[in-house]
Amino acid sequence: MKLSKLYRVANNCVRQSKPKLEKPKVIQFPVIDICNSRCQMCRIWENKQSTDITVDELKLGLNNELFSEVEAIGFNGGEPTLRSDLIDMVRVVVECLPALKHVSLITNAFKYKQVIEQIDGMASVIKQKNINFDVMVSLDGFESVHDAVRGRDGNFENAKHVIRHIMQSKLVDNVRIGCTVIRENVLHLAPLLDFCIENKVYIKYRLGIPHQRLYTQNLLDPYALTFEEKYEFVEFLEGLISNYETSVQQNFFYRSLIDQVIYDEPRQAGCDWQHRGATITAKGELAYCAVESKALMSNISDGDANKVYFKNEGHLNEIIKTKCDSCHHDYVGLPPAAEYRRQLFARLNNKFHIKSLIRKAPFFDNIDKLRQSKAFNFSLSYYRSSIEGSLNAKDSVEQSVLICGWYGTETLGDKAILGGVIESLQASLGQNIKIVLVAINPYISHMTKLQMPELKSANVVGLEEGVRLAGSCGYCVFGGGPLMAINELAPMQVIFENAKKHGRKTIVAGCGVGPLGENFHNESIRQILLLSDIRIYRDNKSQDYAKTLGVPIQEGEVAEDPAFTWLTKPHSSVISNAQYVDKKVILLGLRDFPYKEYARHLPEHECLAIKSRYENVIVCALQTIVGLHPDVIIRPLPMCTNHFGSDDRWFYRKLFRSASDLKSVLDLSLLGPELPPQEYLAAFENCSVLLAMRFHSLVFGVAKGANCLALDYTLGKGKVKSLAERFNVPVMSLQDLNADDVVDQINLFLESKTREPLVRDQLSFIGVLTKQLTNRK
């Protein structure tokens, strides 16, 4: 590595201020101001003619000193391939830019024969100079979705011709798909990703924004996403980060965009146009960024571009000061120093496997446990300090109930739990109790609030506010789910400490206990249980785990999971699945194998072998069943639709991606945008067989009378097996899963009647909680 490059790397690692303005390294060059698409997010196509920079003007302008260090230039539009002299312009660019290394083209590919001809002509010129050539085809959805966004029937099919051609071309170095996200397509992004994965072409997503170069400064409707649409978009981006995107820089951009969209945080992603990028417009104007910059000069051939570029730095600084924090454009560039260091380490780790080497070092486990323990204790201290300034006892509202737990990460099962807990509290305390729901990630629970009538008047708060409010609410409830060994126990413990300090009634309501973990986690679980006036466990095994932690079990009771309470009440808004009545439907309640939480006692290579075998067994078993029952329908149902709990939609799409023989019988209608919880119920009511791996998919199946086969991912150590045995459901461990056994059990169910759904008087949670609350009034 050259000394100059080492210096830049070192400087970028420690710099405290924005980089100084320098000669452009990258140019965005929209070469034409007309287009043959009719995109909803752009108005260029409304132009009937374009007064564009000429080849001679371009040549004269690029010979300016300003462009002597340009390494990359991007041709776009409008539709750049509509310029008859495009190849001549490319020839000028490669001849006049001495440092040029990369040329890119963005095309809508609508007039595909013309586009292919132009690409081939560009490539022949570019490769003569041994310069990298990148082509991006704009696709904004799969098939009809893309055509609707672009306003042109047949656009998707035309684009496929171009994609096939450039992927086979030896003159095109890199092929990409670019998807612009607006209201029209935001709920339909996954099918396009599947298309790209199947065709082995890379795709990046960007959010459509008002844009002066596209004449959309005042066009708002295509970009005005509702909260629900923002929710789906950011969860899709989270899925890209976890399951698809490998570029450290692109993932940081996605992370920055997520924070902007859902948390209204300032942009963190770097941008070359803040210090080393320029735009040449179709007219030949010079500008900084295309989104906000004014024209610095009317034509780069008329005057000293270098002087103008540096003379107008004040305008650039004003853009940075007033516009950049809220900009969602997909520009990337140099990130903040801390993020630069992180990305640098990530690249070094990918190359030299530094983390693996560190983990193999002697005493690493002990040091890591000590580090985790210190971090957990720091979290406890942090939340305890936030109690200062909270409401005093005299400010309490006796009929308010604070519910905490793993909300803000909720699955479909968690929503059912929450509904059951609230109904049970109302049965004892009255219908008018005020609910405060503490959410780890409030935007997740805001979505739940929109979906569930039970939360209509609830107040959703974050962790810090929840900690403060715990001392002023009449009741503090850990509302179902497992008390398990994760770092988020810290704020939950402090919530109970503050409630107890102010004499509030504290309840563990229908919780599991486990899996257990490090001593500091287990001690936190113990403290939460000991701080509880009422302890209701969801099964006997959980009560046994509590006993091992030193919690007196005679003071607790066991009841059914609170989700049963919600599941056995009438739900009038359920969407009918009448088309599945009298059909053989295999409903899937599967998930990725969470071995890091539930198989810590096994080596990782063994866990990965179990995971691989489980996935292969499921696909093979279903293929066999389809061969035996050609009329069967397979419906994957996602119990989790957010990344915090490992979004099941991504797991299913990956699981069936290579099973082409199952596509004709796969009903993927439940893998779209997240539905209100009551709208999933009909799927459980109308299935012939349920393969239940998610714990609450088994709860839903048992409650709705489905024929259930339980797949135990806790490997015999936890909740799935315990629940299956309680309701006489056949259960198979992932550790020794066998395709023949799965097929035999499914066949047996397909030939049998469904079970009877549970009725309210078979349940005990609502009765146990009501009794406990009545006794302690």
Image: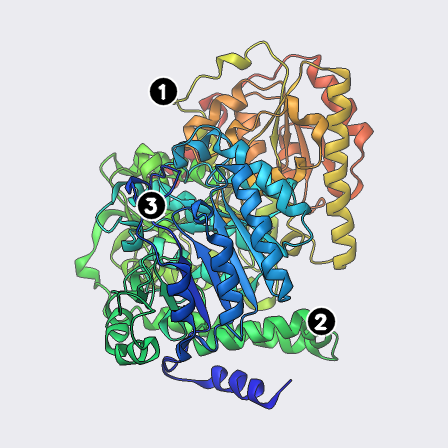
> What residue type is disc 1 on?
Ser
Q: CA distance from mark 2 to mark 3?
A: 39 Å
Residue at disc 2, secondary structure? helix
Please tell me which residue is depicted at 34% across the width and 54% down the height of the picture. Answer: 52
Tell me if mark 3 has few (under 14), some (14-19) or many (20+) residues whose alpha carbon lies within 10 angstroms of its own. Answer: many
Q: Which mark is residue 446?
A: 3
Can you give x and y, in whole percent of width and height, for residue 25 in the image? 46, 73
Tell me if mark 1 has few (under 14), some (14-19) or many (20+) residues whose alpha carbon lies within 10 angstroms of its own. Answer: few
- Mark in the foreground, 3 or 1: 3
Residue 442 appearing in the image: yes
Residue at disc 1, secondary structure? loop
Q: Earlier in the sequence, mark 3 or mark 1?
A: 3
Please tell me which residue is depicted at 59% across the width and 36% down the height of the picture. Answer: 161
Judging from the image, the colouring scheme is rainbow
Can you give x and y, in whole percent of width and height, for residue 250 in the image? 51, 60
Residue picked out by circle 1: 572
Q: Earlier in the sequence, mark 2 or mark 3?
A: 2
Q: CA distance from mark 2 to mark 1?
A: 54 Å
| Above or below: residue 145 compared with residue 173 | above
Q: Which mark is residue 356?
A: 2
> What residue type is disc 3 on?
His
Please tell me which residue is depicted at 36% across the width and 50% down the height of the picture. Answer: 443
Residue at disc 3, secondary structure? helix
Q: Quadrant of residue 352?
A: bottom right
| Above or below: residue 594 compared with residue 300 | above
Q: Quick one: 502 or 742, which is closer to the camera?
A: 742
> What residue type is disc 2 on?
Ser
Q: Quadrant of the N terminus?
A: bottom right
Q: CA distance from mark 3 to mark 1?
A: 22 Å
